[in-house]
Structures are given as C-alpha cells and as structure tokens.
Image (cartoon, helix red, strand yellow):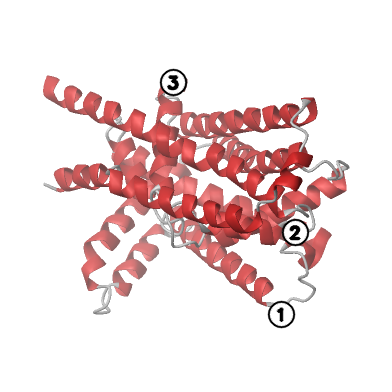
Amino acid sequence: MKEIEQQDDVLQSIKMSKIILPMLIGVAVVVYLMFNQFDIKEFNKITWGTHAFFWIGISVALLVLRHLAYAYRLRVLSDKVFSWKKAIELVFIWEFSSAVSPTSVGGSAVAFFVLSQEKLTVAKTATIVLFTIILDTLFFIGTLPLLYLIFGTEMIRPGVETDLSGWSITFYLAYAAMAIYGSIFYYGLFINPIKIKKFLIFLTKNRFFRKRRDAAIKLGDDIIIASKELKAKPFSHKLKAFLATATAWSTRFLLLSMLIIALQSDVALDFFSQLKLYSRLESMYVIMAFSPTPGSAGVAEVLFKGFLTDYLKDDTVSSIIAIIWRVMTYYSYLLIGVLIIPNWIRKRVADRAKK
C-alpha cells in the first residue's frame, strides 16, 4: 500500500501542472525584467563573435562536467552497482525532481523512491540519499568561511559594508540554517543515530507535528541503517564522494562565471577577481537554497542582477545572461525530465510485470 502511495507521489511530481508552474514563474519574471530593462542600443553593443561563443562553449562543457560529477558520485556511493549510463539517467531524474520542488524542500523524497526501484537495498538507498545531503552541506559549510576570510562582506552583495546589513543577516541566517541542518544529519549518521531517532520522535509529540510521526520514525530508521552502512566504508570511499561533490558544485558556479565573461567584455580575468566573482555566486546560492518557489524560479532571476551589479553594469546584458543561465541549468532539466521519466516508469512497470 505504501509503495503504491509512493508511486502516486512520483507520478504527481511529473504532472504538467507541476512543470508549468515553475516555468510560468520564471518566464513571467524574465519578461518583466526584459520589458523594464531591455535597451536595443545596449543589446547591439554585444559582440556575438569568437570570444562570446568560446566562453559559452566552456560553460556548456562545465554543465556536462557537473552532470558527470554527480553521476560519478552516484556510482561511488552505490559501489558501482549503477553503470555510467544508468547513473547519468538517474541524475537527470534527481535534478528534475529538485526543479519541480521548492528549493528549500529539494528532491530527496523522490530520489529515495527512484533509487529504491533500482534493485538497491534499503540500507544502500538510505545511505546514498542521506549522505548526499551531508556532502552538499559540508561543501558550503567548509568553503564559505574561507571565502569570507578573504573577501569579508564583499562576497555577500555589492554595497554590503557591515555585518548588520539586511543582506548580511539574511546570508548568516541561511548559512546557520544550512549548518544546523547538516550537523543534525552528520551527528545522526556518524555519531549517534539512535539518539537522533529519539529526538525526531520527541518532536512529533507536539500536536502540530503529530501527523508527521510515521515519517519521523521512518527517517530515524533510515538514519540508523545508513549509519551502519557508512561506518563500514573506508575513508577513500567518502573522500571520492566528497571530491565529486566539490567538483559538481564548483562547476555550477564557474559555469555562470563563464557566461558573464562571454558577454561582459570588461570583466577582469585574473585569479583574484574571478575568485571574488565565484564567492559572490556561492553566497547567492545559499540564499536561493531557501526559496519557497520550485527550483528558485523567479527568485534566482531577481537575485542575479542585485548580487552582480559591480560585474554587470548594464541591465540588458544582465537579463540576457540570466536567461541563458536558467535555460542551461534549470529549464533544460525540466524538459529532459519530461522525456526521461515516463520511459523510466514504463521500464519499472515492465520489470515488475516479469516477476
């Protein structure tokens, strides 16, 4: 019965209404920005030549590398149960589920179900999903303080000069929430999973969370199972997974840097300037991570210009870069997911029919 309900949830996640909503939000914001900011004279100043297409090509290569890094991580965490082809397909499904879910929620629930249908044990499925949450969080928790030591509040947003400004506080709160979230899972997976399960059950004693009691118990059980699985793995296994994670996230931000270089001719290319741009993009993502809209649709487009005003001095160029960026990294996954997921579901149904 529960499996049927899970299948229904997955099917619900790929309904056209779920896909259309984030697309409409994003397109509406883009149209608004273009209507208010587009200047034909500034657009004509853009040189669509070798320089632009070279750096756009680099950004496409980084997009492919990012996807392959995620696929490699999935192969490592599954102990190579998945072939490269299967891992690449599953990453598309995972990215799609994240694209149609509020960014603050993510696609972990769908990912858990999808992996469970791929002949993995419960232990292996729980380990992959929960450990990826820790790996993703660890990347941000570890890199952002280092970048802050170098650039201070300049890495948050142009014009932020104190730690008490509105954007600084927003950034610190988002970072703190991410750190707490990751620390809870880390404590549960590597230190005391039983205590975390008891804590989750304790939280559901409150009448406001009582309906989530079964889900809390299930999560607690998953953490205990995953903890045993991870503790049996060598350090090299965890290191490979983290390096793949770091590669995937780094290329996500470098991709956008390449698009800015492609269309904003006066961007400095020295290491320090590019590192500062990278730090700004990573800070922007931390705030985007708590967006209530599916895949940060609308929020990402609005934040983009504000966070990069010292790099993107023209609104028209800014809007065009934002459009290319979102088409490459967001809308493409929506469209590819629509093509891949129905076929994946048909295969799973066919496999069960053979049994």
Inspect this view and state whether residue 10 appears.
yes
Q: Position of residue 152 (x, y in %)?
A: 80, 65
- Which quadrant of the structure image shows residue 126? top left
Q: Residue at x 41, y 35 (%)?
A: 335
Q: Amino acid at mark 3?
A: Lys
Q: Quadrant of residue 219?
A: bottom left
> Pointer 3: what residue?
85
Instruction: Report helix, strand or loop for mark 3.
Output: helix
Instruction: Measuring from the top left, give residue 141's x and y in whole percent.
Output: 63, 57
| Residue depicted at 70% across the width and 46% down the height | 40
Q: In the figure, 237 relative to 31: above or below?
A: above
The quadrant holding residue 345 is top left
Is the residue under label 3 in contact with that under label 2 (CB below 8 Å)? Answer: no
Q: Earlier in the sequence, mark 1 or mark 2?
A: 1
Q: CA distance from mark 3 to mark 1?
A: 48 Å
- Give neighbour class at mark 2: few <14, some 14-19, many 20+ (Cα, 10 Å): some
Residue 354, x across and y down, in percent: 13, 19
Task: Classify 238 as above or below 273.
Answer: above
Q: Nearer the viewer, mark 2 or mark 3?
A: 2
Circle 1 residues within 10 Å: few <14, some 14–19, many ≥20: few
Name the disc covering residue 309, or none. Answer: 2
Mark 3 or mark 1: whose residue is earlier in sequence: 3
The residues tagged by marks 2 and 3 sit, at their Cα atoms, a distance apart of 41 Å
Asked whether 198 or 14 is in front, the reply is 14
Amino acid on which disc 1 is placed = Leu
- Asked whether the residues under the numbered discs 3 and 1 touch, taking CB atoms below 8 Å apart as contact, a structural biologist would say no
Tag in front: 3 or 1:
1
Horizontal side of residue 290 vs 220, given as left or right: right
Q: Secondary structure at mark 1?
A: loop
Which mark is on residue 164? 1
